Image: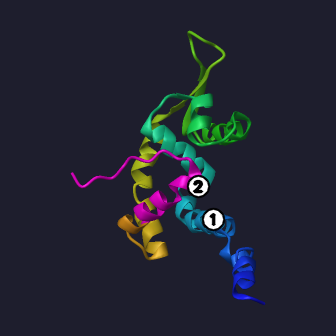
Amino acid sequence: MTESAQSADDLLTLDNQVCFALVTAARNVVAIYRPILEPLGLTHPQYLVMLALWERSPRSLRELAAELALDPATLSPLVKRLEAQGLVTKSRRELDERVLDVRLTDAGRRLRRRALEVPAKVMESVGTDAASLVALRDALAPFSGARHPQITDG
């Protein structure tokens, strides 16, 4: 096999695929979070919902779904379980009853204080620091379509 043919074949090796590395990493990240979130009574998807609500509450279900890159039908059961746990409430918007607002309860706001330990526990579990995670997040930005604030020196 020629060197150019070998190089072309290497392009199709599973271990050389970015998509495979991302899928594997995503699965492993969720596994890392699982025991850390368990004492909070949250699954990883529920944690993501709570993060968004800790940033701003209330939010419409549609807005929350867009922020989390989920369709509302996928988000609804997550919100329903959080509501059953007493962490959020749902209500129709007074001026437009088509809009379903999701808002934190007092218990949901209190949970945030306990969740402040999650990032440090994740970093400890992985053996990395905040700067490395920021660099990783920023390197993934072209693949995620996520909005991330630019980090500047000034």
Which quarter of the image is occupied by the N terminus?
A: bottom right
In the image, taking residue 37 as reference, residue 129 lies left or right, namely: left
Q: Farthest residue toward the left? A: 154
Q: Amino acid at mark 2?
A: Phe
Residues under numbered marks 2 and 1 in contact, where contact means CB atoms less than 8 Å apart: yes
Mark in front: 2 vs 1: 2
Q: Residues within 10 Å of mark 1 (few under 14, many from 20)?
A: few
Q: Position of residue 118 (x, y in %)?
A: 45, 60
The residue type indicated by label 1 comes to: Leu
> In the figure, residue 18 lies in which quadrant?
bottom right
Q: Earlier in the sequence, mark 2 or mark 1?
A: 1
- Residue under pointer 1: 22
- Near-viewer residue (10 or 124): 10
Residue drawn at x 48%, y 61% is 139
Q: Which residues are magenta?
A: 133-154
Residue 142 point in image, percent of width and height: 54, 54
